[in-house]
Amino acid sequence: MLGRVPQIFRRPRSTRRPPSRRSRSDDRGSIALWVIIFTFAVIVLVALMVDGGQLMNAKERAADVAEQAARAAANDVSVADLRAGKVAIATGACAPGGPAASLVASYGQGIGVTAVIPATYRGSQGCTTGLKMTATGPAHFATVTVEVTTVPVIPIGIFGSYQVPATATAVLECGINQGVAC
């Protein structure tokens, strides 16, 4: 049945390659190199995730501080105007020693985050008060912009630190529970 294979189908003996036998020393370190590269990539990705979380937290903090500073400025009612029968926000509400600046300065103490009211932001002042028309008539308002500075986990190059701004407006309303303008 099975006989000899004709010569045309066989390789000549001299061209046959010996089976490849690599020594174990050729493979040493290949897994270790892969583990080192993979570990470095995982550490970088985890650091970026933590920095992204810090960025989102800084945005939330900036919005919260801006809202509280705007409320503090709007609640600073001018006593002289009040005695004269008018309701207005005091002129020092946005001053460096005013309630808005004091609240922002006290915010950053103890938590490792810097929060400031910038002198100008996008062409307007960092803290302003004024009068605007609403559906119920004129209303006094305070607008405050706050920048929160956060340092990332990887503080190198472009990742040195970043400032996250937020702007909030509070309106001075009179009345006990209706918020009726004065």
Image: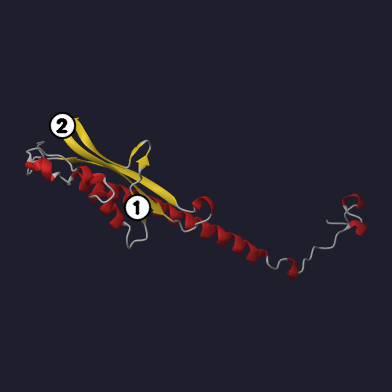
Residue at the image position 12 percent from the left and 45 percent from the top: 79
Q: How far across and how far down the image is residue 179, in percent?
A: 11, 40
**Towards the viewer: 126 or 14:** 126
Screen quadrant of the N terminus? bottom right
Residue picked out by circle 2: 138
Residue 43 vs 117, above or below: the answer is below
**Label 2 CA crowd tier, 10 Å (few <14, some 14–19, many 20+):** few
Residue 61 vs 33, above or below: the answer is above
Screen quadrant of the C terminus? top left
Residue at the image position 52 percent from the left and 57 percent from the top: 44
Q: How far across and how far down the image is residue 66, in percent?
A: 28, 47
Residue picked out by circle 1: 115
Q: Is residue 129 left or right of residue 23?
A: left
Q: Which of the two discs, 2 and 1, labels the residue nearer the N terminus?
A: 1
**Towards the viewer: 13 or 165:** 165
**Towards the viewer: 19 or 6:** 19
**Element on which disc 2 rests:** strand
**Towards the viewer: 44 or 161:** 161
Q: Amino acid at mark 1?
A: Ala
Q: Amino acid at mark 2?
A: Pro
Disc 2/disc 1 C-alpha distance (Å):
31 Å
